[in-house]
Image (spheres, rainbow, N blue to C red):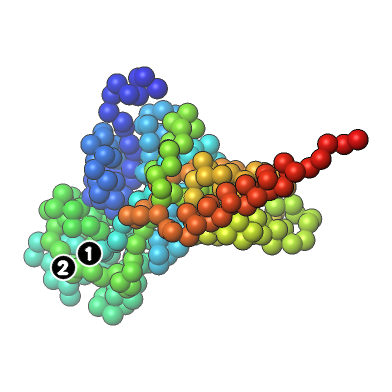
Amino acid sequence: MSDRASRPLRIGFLGPPGTFSEEALLSEPDLAASVVVGLATFSDVVAAVESGDTDLGFLAIENSIEGTVNTNLDALVFERDLLIVREVVLVIQQNLLAPPGTALADIKRVVSYPHATAQCRGWLRRHLPGVEEVAAASTAEGVRMVGQDRPAATAAIGTQLAASHYGLDVLATDIEDHDDNATRFVLVARPEYGIPAPSGHDKTSIVCFQFDDKPGSLHGILGQFSARNLNLTKLESRPTKKGLGDYCFIIDLEGHVDDEIVADCLRDLHATLPRLKFLGSYPAAGASGPQRRRDAEAAWYAADQWITGLRGRIRGGS
């Protein structure tokens, strides 16, 4: 810990320079002041954190259009022992980029990260019908390929930041198919980094593994949250990779493990499930915490005091 405090944090992100990952990371002033390290793949990002080559890693976890980035979520759920320590949400603006002098009518091939291409498929179909889609390891890698190699009749989808890095022109802006296109990123760390203190606006992420031969398992899990009026912001099932029909549930809920009402819920889940994996309690994206969680915690404390009062009236045995 003392060594970490004596030097700037190193944070790995999906490179090269100009990715949406870098743009989202640099939007957080304290993270932007760290040493940021571009890596070739998201797998390299989590491996660097686990090995200690970087202190933290920055991962895309879900997109409002394309949904979960399954490889990254699965790495946290099944493959790595890392904690989420923050989330960042970035509104995504996709751009079509090409070498200077290229016209839209010249484009026969588009290079980008598959998730980014999928977010623009309607625009491509309308403006570049029949265009060939070529996959790249990241949006910035696609921009770099087009900027450095200058293949004929080829454009890239990416950030305006990447266009400036690699000498490309912006042929079209806002080419994503939906106005509410946003990507959620998470900052991950090794367990010894610790759980961030409550901020007043937090999320807790867990993975619930169910009994495969017990009916009503999901209903029982959800009942723990509804009984405490805890709001779920994400509920997703993922195959455990152990056999057909064997699923676990990834759950994000409002609140922090330091909140007694959340701790009480996790305690009951841990006692009743075959396995419960804690992915982290961390500051949520957004300016302020929801009043509903504060009201729920106040109600829990009132109920706890009521029970304590009743127990205090129990007479001793004869």
Question: Which residue was labeled with disc 2?
Answer: 171
Give coordinates of residue 258: x percent, y percent.
Answer: 51, 41
Kindly tell me whether residue 136 is visible in this rendering: no
Tag 2 secondary structure = strand
Camera-nearest label, 2 or 1: 1
The kind of residue on which mark 1 rests is: Asn
Quarter holding the N terminus is top left
Asked if residue 310 is positioned above or below residue 133 in the image, the reply reads: above
Residue with the most extreme right position: 318
Question: Marks 1 and 2: in contact by CB < 8 Å?
Answer: yes
Q: Earlier in the sequence, mark 2 or mark 1?
A: 1
Distance from disc 2 to disc 1, alpha carbons, whole Å, reads 8 Å
Where disc 1 sits, the SS reads: strand
Label 2 crowd bin: few (<14), some (14–19), many (20+), radius 10 Å = some
Q: Residues within 10 Å of mark 1 (few under 14, many from 20)?
A: many
Residue 57 can be seen in this image:
yes
Residue at the spot 27% in from the left edge and 46% down from the top edge? 28
- The answer to whether residue 180 is above or below residue 164 is below
Residue at (30, 72) in percent of width and height: 179
Q: Which residue occupies 25% across, 78% down?
A: 127
Residue 111, image quadrant? bottom left
Q: Residue at x 26, y 39 (%)?
A: 30
Q: Which residue is mark 1?
A: 95
Q: Position of residue 223 (x, y in %)?
A: 66, 59
The label number, if any, that marks residue 30 in the structure image: none
* Residue, far left: 101
Amino acid identity at mark 2: Leu
Which of the pair 307/17 is nearer the observer?
307
Where is residue 123? Give x, y as percent. 29, 75
Q: Position of residue 307 (x, y in %)?
A: 68, 48
Is the residue 19 above or below the residue 233 in the image?
above
Quadrant occupied by the C terminus: top right
